Amino acid sequence: MSKPILILNGPNLNLLGTREPEIYGATTLAQVEEMCRTEAAAHGFEISFHQSNSEAEIVGWIQDAISGAAGIIINPAAFTHTSVAILDALKMVSCPVIELHISNPHAREEFRHRSFVSLAATGTICGLGVAGYTLAVQAMANLLDPAA
């Protein structure tokens, strides 16, 4: 069995579907997870999907990924702009990292324009709604198996 693609979701994403639907849409996190599982399976991959409001828990999952994940897709949410701890953890992994945002942080408040996570990311997808998740899975599959 190959290592899974780790998909991490930060604070408040557990409320996806009801939280500011004008920004984040009406799709729930459970629906996003199913979309990701379907897309990953189409490329021959499995996923490990997590959400936490705790920075420490997210750091722990990233540390576990050092030896346990083929790649990381992370929507760090508000931790994007504040977490040096997540950046430091991501810098320890050797696998590809895709930073993902449902909205376009560059089109929002100025404090959202700075991403610590981008400093460790292989690539970034933002502003495409929840469709960005399936695009991130496709991109990760291509990074992990360019011949696919």
Image (tube, rainbow, N blue to C red):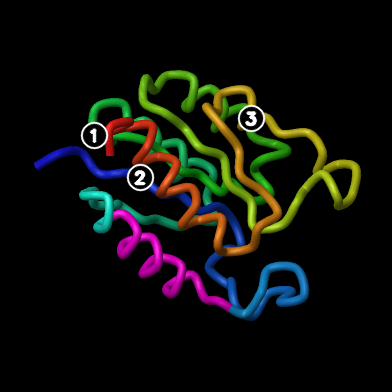
- Other-residue count near label 2 (Cα within 10 Å), few / some / many at <14 / 14–19 / ≥20: many
Q: Mark 1: which secondary structure?
A: helix
Q: Position of residue 118 (x, y in %)?
A: 64, 30
Residue behind mark 3: 118
Residue behind mark 2: 6
Q: Which residues are magenta?
A: 27-40
- Other-residue count near label 3 (Cα within 10 Å), few / some / many at <14 / 14–19 / ≥20: some
Residue behind mark 1: 68
Q: Is residue 38 magenta?
A: yes
Q: Are marks 3 and 2 in contact (CB under 8 Å)?
A: no
Q: Earlier in the sequence, mark 2 or mark 1?
A: 2
Q: Mark 3: which secondary structure?
A: helix
115 to 78, vertically: above or below: above
> Which residue is at 52% across, 50% downward?
54
Q: Position of residue 111 (x, y in %)?
A: 86, 41
**Residue 136 versus residue 56: which sits nearer the camera?**
136
Q: Quadrant of residue 16?
A: bottom right
